[in-house]
Image (cartoon, grey):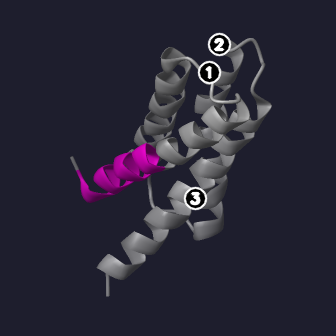
Amino acid sequence: MNRRMKIALIGGALLGLICVAGAYIRSGMSASPEFVFSLWYNRVIIGLAVGAPWPTVPRNKALIRGAVLGLLVSFAFYSSTGFQDPVSFIAGIVYGVILEAWLSRAERSSHP
């Protein structure tokens, strides 16, 4: 597993924790364990998709790629909930961008 993938998976897992906390609060502390786990796992999958060994592109294109991957992966979760959680859907798009921004920064700092 390359460095990019490791960073993206860790980032997806961490962002998933933030997302789960937000969803749990929004649900009035009543979200089921299955819902919470599947939401967290969805964020890990975003990390997997974003962390794939994509060709190097300019940062603005990488950020768009992150948004598109976040949208595609989040849509799977969003549709499985009967389109009931638009906040988590939008957050997935944002998380894809955050992961790409983090990765592009990490890649820049590792190459002098």
Badge number at residue 98: 3
- Is 31 drawn above or below residue 102 in the view shown? above
Q: Earlier in the sequence, mark 3 or mark 2?
A: 2
Describe the element under mark 2 as helix, strand or loop: helix
Residue linked to disc 2:
80
Range covered by the magenta-colored residues: 2-14
Question: Residue 73: x, y in percent?
Answer: 58, 30
Describe the element under mark 3 as helix, strand or loop: helix
Residue linked to disc 1:
76
- Which mark's residue is nearer the viewer, 1 or 2? 2
Alpha carbon distance from label 3 to label 1? 19 Å
Q: Are marks 3 and 1 in contact (CB under 8 Å)?
A: no
- Frontmost residue, 103 versus 34: 34
What secondary structure is the magenta-colored segment mainly? helix
Q: Residue at x 61, y 40 (%)?
A: 70
Residue 50 as seen in the image, left or right of residue 111: right
Residue 86 as seen in the image, left or right of residue 67: right
Question: Which corner quadrant of the image does residue 31 belong to?
Answer: top right
Q: Amino acid at mark 3?
A: Ile
Q: Is residue 38 visible?
A: yes
Question: Residue 110: x, y in percent?
Answer: 30, 77
Q: Are marks 3 and 2 in contact (CB under 8 Å)?
A: no
Q: Earlier in the sequence, mark 3 or mark 1?
A: 1
Question: Residue 87: x, y in percent?
Answer: 76, 37
Q: Residue at x 48, y 43 (%)?
A: 17
Q: Residues within 10 Å of mark 1 (few under 14, many from 20)?
A: few
Q: Residue at x 66, y 38 (%)?
A: 25
- Frontmost residue, 42 versus 4: 42
